[in-house]
Amino acid sequence: MSDPSPAAADIAELAGRLARWEAVEEIKALKHRYFRACDAKDPGGFRDCFIAGARVDYGDLGSTDAEGMAAVFESIALQQVEGRDVILDMHHGMHATIDVHDESTATGRWTLRFRQVNLIDNTETVTSGEYDDDYLRRDGQWKMSACRFRRNWSITRPIDADCRITR
């Protein structure tokens, strides 16, 4: 009669699959925090998504480390006129593909649908693009070690004078 308990190899394989699934979910949560920080105009939350010295390349916005990109983010997204935000952003990340390489490294690709209302120029911009990220797990938390964005296309159009924006 055979032993009805799972073989040690089966248990190890299952434990590995579970660890990869948990890593994928933690990385998704990290990227969601990043998108929320961008839309909430939260430079601290933005920085917290990256390891120190992470490389960030956002094409037209520049290529620098995470601290430098946070400064670019602040100079654009935090603009105000008469105490009101004048740059309104909406990041929608989707179609995530995340490959966990081992317990502390992973890569991912995300499609971005981005919309920005610029009340200084009275324009609305819609952009589609792709993020390619590298992730590291440090002190039990996943963070981005590199983040690259490539725009697929973008359209900017004027906002009509009779358009109302409520907040």
Image (spheres, helix red, strand yellow):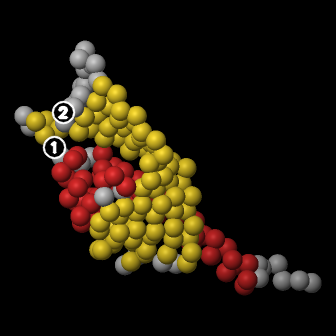
Using the rendered image of the protein, determine whether residue 55 is visible from the camera's viewpoint: yes
Quadrant of the rendered structure where residue 6 is?
Answer: bottom right
Could you classify mark 2 by the number of other residues whose Cα lies within 10 Å: few (under 14), some (14-19), or many (20 or more)? Answer: few
* Residue to which mark 2 is pinned: 120
Decide if residue 71 is on the left or right side of residue 115.
left
Q: Is residue 40 left or right of residue 11?
A: left
Give the amino acid at mark 1: Gln
Q: Are marks 2 and 1 in contact (CB under 8 Å)?
A: yes
Q: Mark 2: which amino acid?
A: Ile
Q: Nearer the viewer, mark 2 or mark 1?
A: 2
Query: Residue beneath label 1, please?
Result: 79
Q: Secondary structure at mark 1?
A: loop
Q: Residue at x 52, y 58 (%)?
A: 109
The residue at the point 24 percent across, 66 percent down is: 67
Q: Residues within 10 Å of mark 1 (few under 14, many from 20)?
A: some
Q: Is residue 33 visible?
A: no
